[in-house]
Amino acid sequence: LDTTVVIIGAGPAGLSLANFLQRGGVGCVVLEMRDRAYVEGRQRAGVIDHRAGEIFAEFGLGDQVTGSGPVETLLEIRTDGVPRLLDVPALAGGRPSRLVPQQLLVQRLIGSYLDGGGDLRFEARDVTPHDLDGDRPHVTYRDADGTTHELTCSYVAGCDGFHGVSRASIPAEELTTYSFDHGIGWYTVLADSPPPRYPLMAVSRHGFAAQFARGPQASRFYLQYQPGDDPRQWPDEHTWSRLRLRLGDDALPEGPITGREVVEMRSFVAEPMAWGRLFLAGDAAHILTPMGAKGMNLAITDAYLLARAITASALHGDDAGLAAYSAACLRRTWDYQEFSRWFAEMVHDAGAESDAFRRRLARARLDRLFESPYAAAAFADLMAGTAFPQA
Ligand code: FAD
Protein backbone atom coordinates (compact mmCIF):
# COMPACT_ATOMS: atom_id res chain seq x y z
CA LEU A 1 0.00 0.00 0.00
CA ASP A 2 1.20 3.52 -0.78
CA THR A 3 -0.76 5.07 2.07
CA THR A 4 -3.69 4.30 4.36
CA VAL A 5 -6.03 7.09 3.25
CA VAL A 6 -6.16 9.11 0.03
CA ILE A 7 -8.00 12.38 0.67
CA ILE A 8 -9.38 14.10 -2.42
CA GLY A 9 -9.65 17.87 -1.93
CA ALA A 10 -7.84 20.37 0.32
CA GLY A 11 -10.75 22.46 1.60
CA PRO A 12 -11.84 22.62 5.24
CA ALA A 13 -13.05 18.97 5.22
CA GLY A 14 -9.97 17.42 3.59
CA LEU A 15 -7.44 19.50 5.51
CA SER A 16 -9.17 18.93 8.88
CA LEU A 17 -9.24 15.20 8.18
CA ALA A 18 -5.56 15.19 7.13
CA ASN A 19 -4.53 16.94 10.36
CA PHE A 20 -6.66 14.68 12.57
CA LEU A 21 -5.30 11.51 10.90
CA GLN A 22 -1.75 12.79 11.11
CA ARG A 23 -2.14 13.43 14.84
CA GLY A 24 -3.74 10.01 15.26
CA GLY A 25 -0.80 8.28 13.57
CA VAL A 26 -2.64 7.25 10.38
CA GLY A 27 -0.87 7.83 7.05
CA CYS A 28 -2.60 9.86 4.35
CA VAL A 29 -1.97 11.73 1.10
CA VAL A 30 -4.03 14.78 0.08
CA LEU A 31 -4.66 15.40 -3.65
CA GLU A 32 -5.83 18.91 -4.56
CA MET A 33 -6.58 20.02 -8.12
CA ARG A 34 -5.80 23.72 -7.57
CA ASP A 35 -2.49 25.38 -6.70
CA ARG A 36 -1.64 26.43 -3.16
CA ALA A 37 -2.12 30.19 -3.72
CA TYR A 38 -5.63 29.64 -5.09
CA VAL A 39 -6.69 27.38 -2.23
CA GLU A 40 -5.24 29.71 0.41
CA GLY A 41 -6.93 32.78 -1.07
CA ARG A 42 -10.49 31.46 -1.46
CA GLN A 43 -12.77 33.55 0.79
CA ARG A 44 -16.04 32.05 1.89
CA ALA A 45 -17.14 31.29 5.45
CA GLY A 46 -16.09 33.19 8.55
CA VAL A 47 -17.33 31.45 11.69
CA ILE A 48 -15.98 28.39 13.50
CA ASP A 49 -18.70 27.37 15.91
CA HIS A 50 -17.93 26.31 19.46
CA ARG A 51 -18.34 22.61 18.71
CA ALA A 52 -15.85 22.75 15.82
CA GLY A 53 -13.46 24.76 18.01
CA GLU A 54 -13.61 21.99 20.65
CA ILE A 55 -12.63 19.45 18.00
CA PHE A 56 -9.48 21.35 17.04
CA ALA A 57 -8.64 21.71 20.75
CA GLU A 58 -9.07 17.93 21.23
CA PHE A 59 -6.37 17.36 18.60
CA GLY A 60 -4.04 19.97 20.15
CA LEU A 61 -4.71 22.38 17.27
CA GLY A 62 -6.80 24.92 19.18
CA ASP A 63 -4.15 27.61 19.66
CA GLN A 64 -2.74 27.18 16.18
CA VAL A 65 -5.98 27.06 14.23
CA THR A 66 -8.69 28.96 16.06
CA GLY A 67 -6.98 30.45 19.13
CA SER A 68 -6.32 33.94 17.84
CA GLY A 69 -9.75 34.41 16.23
CA PRO A 70 -11.91 37.02 17.96
CA VAL A 71 -14.55 35.45 20.16
CA GLU A 72 -18.17 35.94 19.12
CA THR A 73 -20.01 38.34 21.39
CA LEU A 74 -23.47 39.64 20.55
CA LEU A 75 -25.59 39.17 17.43
CA GLU A 76 -27.65 42.13 16.27
CA ILE A 77 -30.91 41.52 14.45
CA ARG A 78 -31.96 45.05 13.50
CA THR A 79 -35.72 45.11 13.00
CA ASP A 80 -37.14 48.06 11.04
CA GLY A 81 -34.04 50.05 12.00
CA VAL A 82 -34.32 49.22 15.73
CA PRO A 83 -31.35 47.28 17.17
CA ARG A 84 -32.15 44.06 19.01
CA LEU A 85 -29.24 42.15 20.53
CA LEU A 86 -28.87 38.47 21.38
CA ASP A 87 -26.03 37.26 23.61
CA VAL A 88 -25.71 33.97 21.75
CA PRO A 89 -22.67 32.57 23.64
CA ALA A 90 -24.31 33.24 27.03
CA LEU A 91 -27.64 31.78 25.86
CA ALA A 92 -25.73 28.68 24.73
CA GLY A 93 -24.32 28.22 28.24
CA GLY A 94 -21.04 30.10 27.74
CA ARG A 95 -20.09 28.57 24.39
CA PRO A 96 -18.79 31.26 22.04
CA SER A 97 -17.96 30.68 18.39
CA ARG A 98 -14.87 32.25 16.87
CA LEU A 99 -14.48 34.51 13.88
CA VAL A 100 -11.92 32.82 11.64
CA PRO A 101 -12.13 33.58 7.91
CA GLN A 102 -12.14 30.35 5.90
CA GLN A 103 -8.98 31.26 3.97
CA LEU A 104 -7.13 31.74 7.28
CA LEU A 105 -8.36 28.37 8.53
CA VAL A 106 -7.19 26.75 5.30
CA GLN A 107 -3.76 28.45 5.48
CA ARG A 108 -3.29 27.34 9.08
CA LEU A 109 -4.39 23.75 8.42
CA ILE A 110 -2.04 23.52 5.44
CA GLY A 111 0.78 24.97 7.57
CA SER A 112 0.30 22.58 10.48
CA TYR A 113 -0.08 19.52 8.22
CA LEU A 114 3.06 20.31 6.23
CA ASP A 115 5.03 21.20 9.39
CA GLY A 116 4.14 17.74 10.67
CA GLY A 117 5.62 16.16 7.54
CA GLY A 118 2.27 15.74 5.73
CA ASP A 119 2.03 14.77 2.05
CA LEU A 120 -0.11 17.32 0.18
CA ARG A 121 0.01 17.38 -3.62
CA PHE A 122 -1.35 20.49 -5.34
CA GLU A 123 -2.28 20.73 -9.01
CA ALA A 124 -3.33 17.07 -9.14
CA ARG A 125 -5.27 16.76 -12.41
CA ASP A 126 -7.84 14.16 -13.45
CA VAL A 127 -8.01 12.63 -10.00
CA THR A 128 -9.91 9.35 -10.42
CA PRO A 129 -10.78 6.80 -7.74
CA HIS A 130 -10.90 3.11 -8.79
CA ASP A 131 -12.16 -0.15 -7.24
CA LEU A 132 -13.96 1.63 -4.45
CA ASP A 133 -16.14 -1.40 -3.77
CA GLY A 134 -13.17 -3.76 -3.47
CA ASP A 135 -10.58 -4.25 -0.69
CA ARG A 136 -7.79 -2.36 -2.43
CA PRO A 137 -8.99 0.90 -3.88
CA HIS A 138 -6.55 3.09 -5.75
CA VAL A 139 -6.54 6.64 -7.04
CA THR A 140 -4.86 7.90 -10.20
CA TYR A 141 -3.98 11.49 -11.10
CA ARG A 142 -1.67 13.52 -13.33
CA ASP A 143 0.81 15.95 -11.83
CA ALA A 144 1.55 19.44 -13.19
CA ASP A 145 4.14 17.93 -15.61
CA GLY A 146 1.55 15.56 -17.04
CA THR A 147 3.02 12.41 -15.43
CA THR A 148 0.40 9.90 -14.28
CA HIS A 149 0.60 8.53 -10.73
CA GLU A 150 -1.27 5.82 -8.89
CA LEU A 151 -1.80 5.53 -5.13
CA THR A 152 -3.11 2.35 -3.51
CA CYS A 153 -4.81 2.74 -0.14
CA SER A 154 -7.34 1.28 2.28
CA TYR A 155 -9.81 4.17 2.36
CA VAL A 156 -10.66 7.08 0.07
CA ALA A 157 -12.04 10.27 1.60
CA GLY A 158 -14.10 12.33 -0.86
CA CYS A 159 -13.63 15.90 0.40
CA ASP A 160 -13.73 17.59 -2.99
CA GLY A 161 -16.74 19.83 -2.60
CA PHE A 162 -20.07 19.91 -4.42
CA HIS A 163 -18.61 19.68 -7.96
CA GLY A 164 -15.95 17.08 -7.18
CA VAL A 165 -15.29 13.66 -8.64
CA SER A 166 -15.92 11.59 -5.50
CA ARG A 167 -19.70 11.66 -5.28
CA ALA A 168 -19.86 11.21 -9.05
CA SER A 169 -17.90 7.94 -8.63
CA ILE A 170 -20.77 6.34 -6.75
CA PRO A 171 -23.24 4.51 -9.03
CA ALA A 172 -26.35 6.68 -9.35
CA GLU A 173 -28.64 3.87 -8.22
CA GLU A 174 -26.76 3.66 -4.90
CA LEU A 175 -27.45 7.31 -4.00
CA THR A 176 -30.57 9.21 -3.05
CA THR A 177 -30.20 12.95 -3.50
CA TYR A 178 -32.34 15.77 -2.17
CA SER A 179 -32.20 19.26 -3.70
CA PHE A 180 -34.13 22.30 -2.58
CA ASP A 181 -34.20 25.79 -4.05
CA HIS A 182 -35.15 28.29 -1.35
CA GLY A 183 -36.34 30.79 -3.97
CA ILE A 184 -34.22 33.53 -2.44
CA GLY A 185 -31.57 35.50 -4.34
CA TRP A 186 -28.58 36.91 -2.46
CA TYR A 187 -26.06 39.41 -3.72
CA THR A 188 -22.91 39.49 -1.62
CA VAL A 189 -20.12 42.05 -1.82
CA LEU A 190 -16.80 42.21 -0.04
CA ALA A 191 -15.74 45.79 0.71
CA ASP A 192 -12.89 47.62 2.43
CA SER A 193 -15.37 49.09 4.81
CA PRO A 194 -15.11 48.98 8.63
CA PRO A 195 -16.97 46.01 10.13
CA PRO A 196 -20.05 46.48 12.31
CA ARG A 197 -19.70 46.37 16.07
CA TYR A 198 -21.54 43.04 16.15
CA PRO A 199 -22.49 40.64 13.35
CA LEU A 200 -25.53 42.37 11.91
CA MET A 201 -28.68 41.12 10.21
CA ALA A 202 -31.39 43.57 9.25
CA VAL A 203 -35.04 42.75 8.72
CA SER A 204 -37.38 45.38 7.32
CA ARG A 205 -40.14 45.85 4.75
CA HIS A 206 -37.38 46.71 2.23
CA GLY A 207 -35.97 43.16 2.39
CA PHE A 208 -33.07 41.42 4.11
CA ALA A 209 -29.50 42.71 4.42
CA ALA A 210 -26.53 41.68 6.56
CA GLN A 211 -23.03 42.84 7.37
CA PHE A 212 -20.27 40.69 8.87
CA ALA A 213 -16.63 41.38 9.74
CA ARG A 214 -14.02 39.97 7.37
CA GLY A 215 -10.96 41.37 9.12
CA PRO A 216 -10.28 44.65 10.95
CA GLN A 217 -11.02 46.85 7.92
CA ALA A 218 -13.24 44.70 5.72
CA SER A 219 -16.90 43.67 5.67
CA ARG A 220 -18.96 41.19 3.75
CA PHE A 221 -22.44 42.52 2.93
CA TYR A 222 -25.46 40.51 1.85
CA LEU A 223 -28.56 41.81 0.06
CA GLN A 224 -31.67 39.86 -0.84
CA TYR A 225 -32.67 40.59 -4.43
CA GLN A 226 -35.81 40.01 -6.49
CA PRO A 227 -35.90 36.94 -8.75
CA GLY A 228 -35.24 38.07 -12.34
CA ASP A 229 -33.01 40.96 -11.26
CA ASP A 230 -29.24 40.78 -11.99
CA PRO A 231 -27.50 42.59 -9.13
CA ARG A 232 -24.06 42.18 -10.74
CA GLN A 233 -25.20 44.96 -13.09
CA TRP A 234 -26.00 47.32 -10.23
CA PRO A 235 -23.76 50.41 -10.05
CA ASP A 236 -21.96 50.46 -6.70
CA GLU A 237 -23.92 53.52 -5.57
CA HIS A 238 -27.14 51.55 -6.02
CA THR A 239 -25.73 48.76 -3.83
CA TRP A 240 -24.72 51.24 -1.11
CA SER A 241 -28.07 53.05 -1.17
CA ARG A 242 -29.92 49.74 -0.75
CA LEU A 243 -27.63 48.75 2.09
CA ARG A 244 -28.17 52.09 3.85
CA LEU A 245 -31.92 51.73 3.51
CA ARG A 246 -32.15 48.15 4.69
CA LEU A 247 -29.57 48.45 7.46
CA GLY A 248 -31.37 51.62 8.56
CA ASP A 249 -28.04 53.47 8.66
CA ASP A 250 -27.71 56.71 6.68
CA ALA A 251 -24.09 57.05 7.83
CA LEU A 252 -22.95 53.54 6.77
CA PRO A 253 -19.22 53.92 5.97
CA GLU A 254 -18.53 52.94 2.36
CA GLY A 255 -15.31 51.54 0.93
CA PRO A 256 -14.06 50.09 -2.35
CA ILE A 257 -15.92 46.91 -3.32
CA THR A 258 -13.34 44.17 -3.87
CA GLY A 259 -15.58 41.21 -4.65
CA ARG A 260 -19.09 40.61 -5.98
CA GLU A 261 -20.93 37.32 -6.00
CA VAL A 262 -24.42 35.99 -6.41
CA VAL A 263 -25.15 33.25 -3.89
CA GLU A 264 -27.58 30.51 -4.72
CA MET A 265 -29.76 29.81 -1.75
CA ARG A 266 -30.09 26.10 -2.23
CA SER A 267 -29.69 22.95 -0.23
CA PHE A 268 -28.52 19.52 -1.23
CA VAL A 269 -28.00 16.21 0.55
CA ALA A 270 -26.71 12.91 -0.84
CA GLU A 271 -27.46 9.70 1.06
CA PRO A 272 -25.63 7.60 2.09
CA MET A 273 -22.27 9.33 2.62
CA ALA A 274 -20.33 6.10 2.13
CA TRP A 275 -20.00 3.52 -0.59
CA GLY A 276 -17.52 0.63 -0.35
CA ARG A 277 -14.22 2.17 0.76
CA LEU A 278 -15.25 5.72 -0.20
CA PHE A 279 -16.44 8.13 2.49
CA LEU A 280 -17.80 11.57 1.59
CA ALA A 281 -17.28 14.57 3.87
CA GLY A 282 -18.34 18.23 3.71
CA ASP A 283 -19.82 19.86 0.61
CA ALA A 284 -19.19 16.68 -1.41
CA ALA A 285 -22.20 15.25 0.45
CA HIS A 286 -24.28 18.27 1.42
CA ILE A 287 -24.63 22.00 0.92
CA LEU A 288 -26.62 24.38 3.05
CA THR A 289 -27.67 27.99 2.69
CA PRO A 290 -25.29 30.36 4.50
CA MET A 291 -28.05 31.06 7.07
CA GLY A 292 -26.76 29.76 10.40
CA ALA A 293 -23.19 29.50 9.05
CA LYS A 294 -23.08 25.71 9.25
CA GLY A 295 -21.50 24.62 5.93
CA MET A 296 -17.87 24.84 7.00
CA ASN A 297 -18.67 23.58 10.48
CA LEU A 298 -20.41 20.48 9.14
CA ALA A 299 -17.35 19.87 6.95
CA ILE A 300 -15.19 19.93 10.11
CA THR A 301 -17.50 17.68 12.15
CA ASP A 302 -17.76 15.17 9.27
CA ALA A 303 -13.94 15.13 9.14
CA TYR A 304 -13.82 14.52 12.88
CA LEU A 305 -16.23 11.58 12.80
CA LEU A 306 -14.43 10.13 9.78
CA ALA A 307 -10.99 10.51 11.38
CA ARG A 308 -12.16 8.71 14.50
CA ALA A 309 -13.78 5.94 12.48
CA ILE A 310 -10.80 5.41 10.16
CA THR A 311 -8.33 5.48 13.05
CA ALA A 312 -10.31 2.79 14.92
CA SER A 313 -10.51 0.67 11.76
CA ALA A 314 -6.92 1.13 10.59
CA LEU A 315 -5.19 0.83 13.96
CA HIS A 316 -7.52 -1.49 15.91
CA GLY A 317 -9.53 -3.36 13.26
CA ASP A 318 -12.74 -1.90 14.68
CA ASP A 319 -15.10 -1.01 11.81
CA ALA A 320 -18.10 0.03 13.93
CA GLY A 321 -17.40 3.75 13.46
CA LEU A 322 -17.14 3.37 9.69
CA ALA A 323 -20.44 1.47 9.59
CA ALA A 324 -22.12 4.23 11.63
CA TYR A 325 -20.38 7.16 9.88
CA SER A 326 -22.94 8.03 7.24
CA ALA A 327 -25.96 7.89 9.56
CA ALA A 328 -24.19 9.97 12.23
CA CYS A 329 -23.25 12.70 9.74
CA LEU A 330 -26.66 12.72 8.09
CA ARG A 331 -28.39 13.12 11.45
CA ARG A 332 -26.43 16.37 12.00
CA THR A 333 -26.85 17.42 8.38
CA TRP A 334 -30.65 17.29 8.46
CA ASP A 335 -30.73 19.04 11.82
CA TYR A 336 -28.70 21.88 10.34
CA GLN A 337 -30.69 21.92 7.09
CA GLU A 338 -33.82 22.42 9.15
CA PHE A 339 -32.16 25.18 11.19
CA SER A 340 -30.90 26.93 8.09
CA ARG A 341 -34.35 26.83 6.46
CA TRP A 342 -36.05 28.03 9.68
CA PHE A 343 -33.57 30.91 9.94
CA ALA A 344 -33.92 31.83 6.25
CA GLU A 345 -37.71 32.03 6.49
CA MET A 346 -37.53 34.16 9.62
CA VAL A 347 -35.38 36.89 8.12
CA HIS A 348 -36.43 36.78 4.45
CA ASP A 349 -40.19 36.40 4.75
CA ALA A 350 -40.49 39.49 6.96
CA GLY A 351 -40.23 42.02 4.09
CA ALA A 352 -42.59 43.33 1.43
CA GLU A 353 -41.43 40.67 -1.05
CA SER A 354 -43.35 38.04 0.86
CA ASP A 355 -47.11 37.57 1.09
CA ALA A 356 -48.92 38.99 4.12
CA PHE A 357 -49.44 35.65 5.88
CA ARG A 358 -45.78 34.58 5.66
CA ARG A 359 -44.76 38.06 6.75
CA ARG A 360 -46.76 37.74 9.96
CA LEU A 361 -45.38 34.25 10.62
CA ALA A 362 -41.81 35.50 10.18
CA ARG A 363 -42.38 38.41 12.56
CA ALA A 364 -43.90 36.05 15.16
CA ARG A 365 -40.87 33.75 14.92
CA LEU A 366 -38.48 36.69 15.26
CA ASP A 367 -40.32 38.21 18.22
CA ARG A 368 -40.41 34.87 20.02
CA LEU A 369 -36.61 34.77 19.86
CA PHE A 370 -36.42 37.97 21.90
CA GLU A 371 -39.32 37.23 24.22
CA SER A 372 -38.86 33.56 25.15
CA PRO A 373 -35.62 32.48 26.84
CA TYR A 374 -36.40 28.90 25.79
CA ALA A 375 -36.67 29.84 22.11
CA ALA A 376 -33.50 31.91 22.40
CA ALA A 377 -31.60 29.05 24.08
CA ALA A 378 -32.65 26.58 21.36
CA PHE A 379 -31.43 29.03 18.71
CA ALA A 380 -28.15 29.60 20.55
CA ASP A 381 -27.55 25.85 20.94
CA LEU A 382 -27.70 25.41 17.16
CA MET A 383 -25.50 28.45 16.60
CA ALA A 384 -22.86 27.05 18.99
CA GLY A 385 -23.06 23.60 17.38
CA THR A 386 -25.10 20.73 18.78
CA ALA A 387 -23.75 17.74 20.68
CA PHE A 388 -22.95 14.57 18.76
CA PRO A 389 -25.84 12.11 18.89
CA GLN A 390 -25.18 9.12 21.10
CA ALA A 391 -24.43 5.94 19.17
P1 FAD B 1 -14.58 22.97 -0.43
O1 FAD B 1 -14.24 24.13 0.43
O2 FAD B 1 -15.36 23.20 -1.66
O3 FAD B 1 -13.21 22.26 -0.79
C1 FAD B 1 -13.13 21.24 -1.77
C2 FAD B 1 -11.71 21.20 -2.32
O4 FAD B 1 -11.62 20.14 -3.25
C3 FAD B 1 -11.32 22.47 -3.06
O5 FAD B 1 -10.05 22.89 -2.63
C4 FAD B 1 -11.32 22.05 -4.52
O6 FAD B 1 -10.39 22.78 -5.30
C5 FAD B 1 -10.94 20.58 -4.42
N1 FAD B 1 -11.41 19.76 -5.54
C6 FAD B 1 -12.60 19.84 -6.19
N2 FAD B 1 -12.67 18.91 -7.15
C7 FAD B 1 -11.50 18.21 -7.11
C8 FAD B 1 -10.98 17.13 -7.85
N3 FAD B 1 -11.70 16.57 -8.83
N4 FAD B 1 -9.75 16.68 -7.55
C9 FAD B 1 -9.03 17.23 -6.55
N5 FAD B 1 -9.46 18.28 -5.81
C10 FAD B 1 -10.70 18.75 -6.08
N6 FAD B 1 -20.10 28.09 5.53
C11 FAD B 1 -20.17 28.46 6.82
O7 FAD B 1 -20.04 27.61 7.71
N7 FAD B 1 -20.36 29.77 7.17
C12 FAD B 1 -20.48 30.76 6.26
O8 FAD B 1 -20.63 31.93 6.62
C13 FAD B 1 -20.38 30.40 4.87
N8 FAD B 1 -20.44 31.34 3.92
C14 FAD B 1 -20.26 30.99 2.61
C15 FAD B 1 -20.26 32.00 1.64
C16 FAD B 1 -20.08 31.67 0.30
C17 FAD B 1 -20.06 32.77 -0.71
C18 FAD B 1 -19.91 30.29 -0.07
C19 FAD B 1 -19.71 29.91 -1.53
C20 FAD B 1 -19.91 29.30 0.89
C21 FAD B 1 -20.09 29.63 2.23
N9 FAD B 1 -20.09 28.65 3.23
C22 FAD B 1 -20.20 29.03 4.54
C23 FAD B 1 -19.93 27.23 2.92
C24 FAD B 1 -18.50 26.77 3.13
O9 FAD B 1 -17.61 27.62 2.44
C25 FAD B 1 -18.38 25.32 2.66
O10 FAD B 1 -19.35 24.55 3.34
C26 FAD B 1 -16.99 24.73 2.90
O11 FAD B 1 -16.05 25.31 2.04
C27 FAD B 1 -17.00 23.22 2.67
O12 FAD B 1 -15.70 22.71 2.77
P2 FAD B 1 -15.29 21.43 1.93
O13 FAD B 1 -13.88 21.14 2.31
O14 FAD B 1 -16.30 20.38 2.09
O15 FAD B 1 -15.40 21.88 0.40
Image (cartoon, helix red, strand yellow):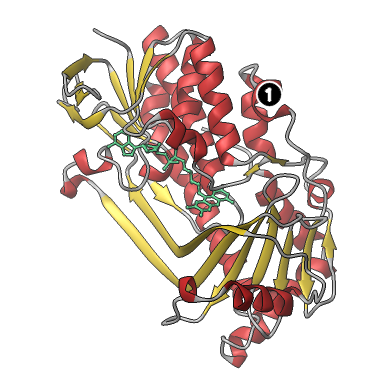
Residue at the (74%, 73%) spot, across then down: 247
Q: Residue 108, position in %: x, y?
A: 58, 26
The answer to which of 309 and 115 lies nearer the viewer is 115
Name the quadrant containing residue 366: bottom right
Note whether 54 is above or below 256 in the view shown: above
Say which element carries label 1. Answer: helix
Q: Residue 43, position in %: x, y?
A: 53, 45
The answer to which of 370 and 38 lies nearer the viewer is 38
Ligand 1 sits in which quadrant?
A: top left
Note whether 178 is above or below 300 in the view shown: below
Is 3 left or right of 264, judged from the image as shown? left
Note whether 255 is above or below 30 in the view shown: below
Residue at the (34%, 18%) spot, across then down: 5
User: Disc 1 marks which amino acid?
Assistant: Gly
Is 146 left or right of 326, judged from the image as shown? left
Is 96 left or right of 306, judged from the image as shown? right
Q: Residue 31, position in %: x, y?
A: 33, 25
Q: How many numbered marks appear?
A: 1
- Which part of the image, by quadrant, shows the N terminus? top left
The residue that mark 1 highlights is: 62
At label 1, counting other C-alpha atoms closer than 10 Å, the crowd grade (few under 14, some 14-19, many 20 or more) is some
